[in-house]
Image (cartoon, helix red, strand yellow):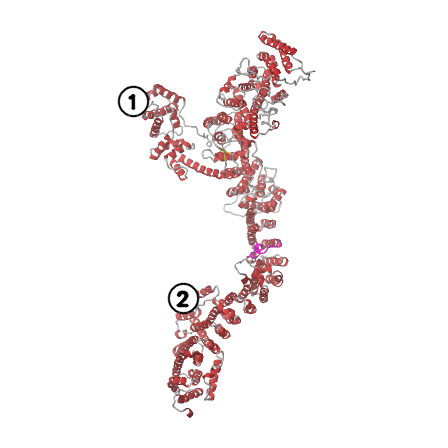
Amino acid sequence: MKQPHSAKEMFITRALEKILSDKEIKRSYHSQLKKACEVALKDIKSEVSFREEGAKEDRSDTLPLPKDGSTVIDADKYFLPFELACQSKCSRIVVIALDCLQKLIAYGHLVGGTPDNLNPGKLLIDRIVETVCICFQGTQTDEGVQLQIIKALLTAVTSSSCEVHEGSVLQAVRTCYNIYLASRNLINQTTAKATLTQMLNVIFARMESQAELEEKKKIEDEQKVTQSDSNAEDSDPPSELVVQDVQQNGEVDNEHAEHSTEEIVSSIVGELISAAVESETENAVVQNGEHLSDELPSTSPALGRPVGKVRSPMSDQASHHGSEYTEDTVSIESGDLHEQTHTKFSHVLQKDAFLVFRSLCKLSMKPLPDGPVDPKSHELRSKILSLQLLLSILQNAGPVFRTNDMFINAIKQYLCVALSKNGVSSVPDVFELSLAIFVTLLSNFKTHLKMQIEVFFKEIFLNILETTSSSFEHKWMVIQALTRICADAQSVVDIYINYDCDLALVNIFERLVNDLSKIAQGVELGASLNQEKSMRIKGLECLVSILKCMVEWSRDIYVNPTPQTNLASPAENHSDSGKGSLSTHSSSSLLSAGSSQNVPNLRLDNPEQFESIKQQKGILEQGIDLFNRKPKKGLEFLRQQGLLQDTPKDVAALFHNEERLDNTVIGDFMGENENFNKEVMYEYVDLMNFAGRDFVSALRGFLEGFRLPGEAQKIDRLMEKFAARFCECNSSMGIFASADTAYVLAYSIIMLATDLHSVSVKQKMTKEQYIRMNRGINDSKDLPEEYLSQIYDEIAETEISMKPTSSKPSRKGAPVGTEKQRKVIYNMEMEQMAHTAKALMESVSHLEAPFTAATQLDHVRPMFKVAWTSFLAAFSIGLQVCDDPKIASLCLDGLRCAIRISCIFRMELERDAYVQALSRFTLLTANSQITEMKAKNIDTIKTLIAVAQTDGNYLGKSWLEILKCISQLELAQLIGTGVRTRYISTSTTAKPGNHKTPDESFAHPVSKMDQKRMASLQESMGETSSQSVVVAVDRIFTGSTRLDGEAIVDFVTALCHVSEEELSSHAHPRMFSLQKIVEISYYNMGRIRLQWSRIWEILGDHFNKVGCNPNEDIAFFAVDSLRQLSMKFIEKGEFANFRFQKDFLRPFEHIMKKNRSPTIRDMVVRCVAQMVNSQAHNIKSGWKNIFSVFHLAASDYDESIVELAFQTMGKIISSVFEKYFTAMIDSFQDAVKCLSEFACNAAFPDTSMEAIRLIRNCAKYVSDRPQLFQEHAGEDLTIPAEDRVWVKGWFPVLFELSCVINRCKLDVRTRGLTVMFEIMKTYGDTFKHHWWRDIFRVLFRIFDNMKLPEQQNEKAEWMTTTCNHALYAIVDVFTQYFDSLYEVLLDDLYVQLYWCVQQDNEQLARSGTNCLENLVISCGNKFNEETWDKTCALVLDVFHKTLPTGLLTWRRGDLDVSASLLHSSAAVHHEDVIDDADVVTSRQRAPSQDHRERRSHSLSKPAEDHRLFSSMLIKCVVQLELIQTIDNIVFFPATSRKEDADNLAAAQAGLADSPREGSWQQEEQGMYLYLNSGQLFSLLDCLLESHKFAKAFNANHEQRNMLWKAGFKGKVKPNLLKQETASLACVLRILYQMYTDENRRSSWPDVQKRLLAVCREALDYFLTLGSESHREAWSALLLLFLTRTLKMPDERFRVHASVYYPLLCDMLGIELKQELRSVLRRFFVRIGPVFAIVKPNSL
């Protein structure tokens, strides 16, 4: 069949023919219709006959092609018959007409773009739409007509060929809306609802597309670039209609849609009908509240999608109830079109969208009838439908709708106000839809609705959750909505920073979390058990969702140390991977669209700034709370915190601006009679502006900010100030004569309001009474009655009330008795909430509040800080009281998320609390009952392990709790496998104060546990031994390598602590953690040295403790583990100047030092020996520890330990030194010290001798490799290169040898002394001057032992042997290297000699003088004058100190004198060069200071005398030694004795002639030649002093007898004859020598004077001697005197003879020896010639 020339013929002709063929057309009232149809047919045929035939084209009856523009205009001509047909009362005719119109519009043949002939102000399309809409006549309209109306209107509104705008759009929407409400057919209802949804989608999609095109065109114009429109994307993807680009003139380019509209509409209607028929059979929509957990009604926004679950009443079964449907009560008002003529729209499409949206908002605001609501009532169904359509609009809102101020204001003024009412509806569907709309608003419009969102939360949703009387259904729906909100990270964080961090707004986030926490805990839910459980689960889901949002928000900060984990969380089947985030909550979810674009009021979110505001807000809230209880203290607190100035104006401003202040408290405060309160009240009123307001309105405004106090005087003050302010602002009003009038009138209005609106007042005041009451108040005149009457009417109509504030429904109190009572109370509270919310919503509808879109990650920290306790309470109680797997899983998820957050932000307190809570619920801690372990506890263990794996880098000190649990888990695994069932604790409760270690809590043997319970326990605990748990635990330790530097330190610290607890159990110590310590040491040994050093500092300390454990098995394991670790570590080698090996091997040293177990000590030595034998080439700094261990072993008494250690040392010195000496230089000193310790072990003398030999070998290494020491700086960089060989080489060797000398027995120390001085003599030529000083400081330490109070015998032996030997050796070395030493060490040597001479040891004292003599004789020829002065001074000091003055002063029984003498002899000041000399001296001196007090109690008198006598005797010996020393020094040894022998021989032979003085000068004269006269005179003085003392003592016979009787010097009466004669003989020799020395001629007069005096005094003394033995002792002296005098020249002889002659004559009367008489004869013989008495020849 061929297609007609035009589609209109097909559609129009067929339709008209059908109409004419209908039997109803013949009725009279259809005559006009019949005629119109016939005329139209005739016109069509006429037009066809005269029109030229065009090209023949194939045509289709179902898809005709649209005509061009001319034919469309023709089609518009034939609208009249269809209009009349639509007005017909025959439904068949109406259906035919509507169907034809729908097709014409669908295929673009009927556009209606021409003006309407009947109404030129409108277009034909408006008339067409109106005609279609008129077809609907209410509930009586035929169902087929209803369906055709829906199809026609849908086609008209969505068609791309015609434009329907403004009123026509509203009319089309209204008609479909009314069909939905009025139709009894479920199919028609469903179709109408879906049609409405699609109409709205198209209306708003066209608006968005048009705006998008304009924006693109604007960009194209700016950039001058042509772009193809074919790639432009549709702005409404869900819609399946092909809505193409809208042109600027409003037409639609429809290349691709002209053939599809009819198909789409038909298919959609068909699908809707099918769905409705199916749902008709599913008449199981339960309305009793049991399925409240279903999803919200799902209305598909897309035309081409089938509608999901549609919750609607069964309208097809609705009864008429005798009432007709009233269109005006529920439909869209036509007046909406002209309500906002002042609004400017950018395009008519925008106006269409606005009008429809506003109309729907108003429909949703219509109140429901009072009383119980019928679910099938038109009012309820209208409200539900309007809310559903609004929800659809909001969910599919595009950028224009979300950002345009016009729509935003509409949402604020209409939708939000409507929601404030519907949000507290008792109808579940309305309430549920309101929640869904709110969630969508929060998603898409939160940046514009900051204030409105606060009202929703604080006044509705949170109040419903908090009040105890609210129904379970409402709470359930609220928490479902909150679940969606809490699932979006962006919204959660935005809520916190915009409300909790705003000083003026409520803490929504904190309050929300607290409420959810209470719900999760099951606090006062008022529901059945199942409902309560479901609610608790939902609350937990919300809390967990919030935490997951916070985790997701901060995921960029988190670093997962374990990329993969084998153990899944109980709530998850997947493991954390990648970034390690928990169950991912993407911020691009349902609510993610809240970050609107191009919003001008967004602010930057500085976390520090918001945190500061939050802190300030906390302080402010604290102050407000304090003010509401105690106003003065509250204001003072705010002043102290700097939030309030101390001025009345600032306080008044606070009262105005802060809504959280209690209005009653404000009224009472301002009503007080105190000056400050009145000033605040005055400022409060002055801040209000009453200009231009009527009196009642001003009074209402005045009283809305506070509650009037009850006291009349307070009210009086307030009204007085108000009246004054009102008159001040309205001075030109002229009604009041004065402010008094206003004051009285205000007071009377207050009284009137109280009277009319108080429940307690029964007799209400009439208007006449009120007018009469106010007579004469206007300056004795009356106010106009009309004015007062108006006031009365206004007050009677509206009560004076305060401005709306937050409603506070009952949250706590006695539980409601019955369900009916609860509902009554809840309804009252809901009404109050609705009233408050609506008032607040209206008050903020015009406010603009800046909204901050959160972007910074750091917001999570203060968020968690605020809410962490609520989270913890909810999860802890959930785990504690409930065994439900779902609840336990959620709680564990929440705990894991909370730990993650606290870890990420380093919140130690919070982290520790959560980890402790988690560990507590594992039942593995010390006070838990492991026999009660359940599945949730196993899951808790797995969660704890997962936390350890994923959050290890952040756990810090919380590792301790985790590792404690893992330690106990190992024990539980043993129990679960039946290994240690005897250690299960059967106690049900822990006794107070009974603190046990974790292991001990298990260590109670099971005595009466039945087999069934044991099997059950093992089964539950056997889960802890599952492969997944074991592997996960193992991964904690193997994964320690991935922990960062700080985390591994915390991990190791905690593991060591747990290991200590395990090992501290005396009954059953365990080594699980110790084994893990060894493992992680292996794993982490490859870390950088900086980290490893910190790790080993902790591990090493732990090994120190474990290695000293009294349990040898444990200590042995520790040492063996150390050995293995050390070998592995040493294998890695070490660079020079590093000390890692030293730190690593230190535990060996500590264990060796502290552990006295021979087994362990032997093990340590063997381990170290093995290292030396196998890894000597890799050991660097570790040598120090090795030598330290051997040093400790050297002092052991176990032969095997000492022998093994010494063998290894011998190998080191003999072979290792040879190969690796360079690497061992740093440890050379330690090696020598170690050998010294071996030498000092008295138990093994052979080892001691061998050790000294090895030390001697060490000296050879130093001598052979000095350059190595110079090149190696070591740790101390301050040592000059030239001194390094001394400090690191020579000095350690010599010092340790000195230690051997000081500590060992005689044979060993003698060998050590010999070797030490041998080394000095052998290598001393390489020593520098300052090295020698150090050497002698060491040498002098040998003598320091004598300063310590020790046993007398040992001291004597030491002095006699070692000191004596050392002293001679020192002088020997000094003599050998005198040239190098004398300048730096002579003084020190003299001091040491001085000290030796003073000792109570005769041998040492003698040695001191002898050494001095040897030194001077050997080196005196090298002395300079200064040195001789020092030497002479030393001799003088020694003479003075050793002079035994006590011999003359001692008295029997005088203990004080004895003590003082003893003290003076023993405690001699000695300024030593050794560092500790002062200590030693003070130590020696201290006992002497209180010697007198203790002497009578500690020493007997004979012992005291013996010690004193011994000391004096030694001094006498020293005096003699000194005299002989001087003689030997001056004249060389044996010179004097030879002279005495010669004199005696000459006297005996009677030789007359003897050599003269000149011949003596040619002989050896000792050091005499090097001493000047002054020095000789000083020596003479001390000799004479010694001589005089001896002479005095010898002459004191009484004292001598006393001493003799007391036991001094044994059986012979003491005398000092030798001292007396020897000292004088030495004096005479020196004087005679000087007297004959030509080089000292200048001193001769002085010498002669001294000689004469000495000789005369000596002769006088000799003549007084009465004892034959005493005179005999003087014989040699007299021989010397006479012989030397005779040898003088005559001149000198004459002088001397003249002085001595009388005395010599007296000598003749004494019996003299023959030798003396012979010499005396020669003296007298010579007198004759010399004095010329006889001639020389006559002799």
Discs 1, 2 touching: Cβ within 8 Å: no
Is residue 451 located in the magenta-colored stretch of the structure? Answer: no
1263 w.r.t. 39: above or below: below
Q: Is residue 97 visible?
A: yes
Q: Nearer the viewer, residue 1017 or 92?
A: 92
- Report the amino acid beneath label 1: Ser
Kind of residue indicated by mark 2: Glu
Q: CA distance from mark 1 to mark 2?
A: 115 Å
**Span shown in magenta:** 1131-1150
> Residue 1083 shows which numbered tag?
none
Tell me if residue 723 comes above or below residue 1019 in the rendering.
above
- In the depicted structure, whether residue 616 falls above or below residue 1674: above
User: Relative to 1434, is 272 on the left or the right?
Assistant: right
Question: Would you say the magenta stretch is mainly helix, strand or loop?
Answer: helix
Instruction: Give coordinates of residue 1558: x percent, y percent.
Output: 46, 83
Magenta residue check for 1146: yes
Residue 285: image location, x then y, percent: 58, 24
Q: x and y percent of residue 1217 in the render?
A: 61, 62
In the image, 1331 versus 773, the foreground residue is 1331
Q: Is residue 473 visible?
A: no
Question: Dividing the image into 4 quarters, which one contains the N terminus?
Answer: top right
Within-10-Å neighbours for mark 1: few <14, some 14–19, many 20+: few
Secondary structure at numbered mark 2? helix
The residue positioned farthest toward the front in the image shown: 224
Write down the residue under mark 2: 1493
- Which residue is under mark 1? 780
Residue 921 in the image: above or below residue 710: below
Q: Can you tell which quarter of the image residue 836 is in?
A: top left
Q: Position of residue 52 (x, y in %)?
A: 66, 13
Label 1, secondary structure: give it.
loop
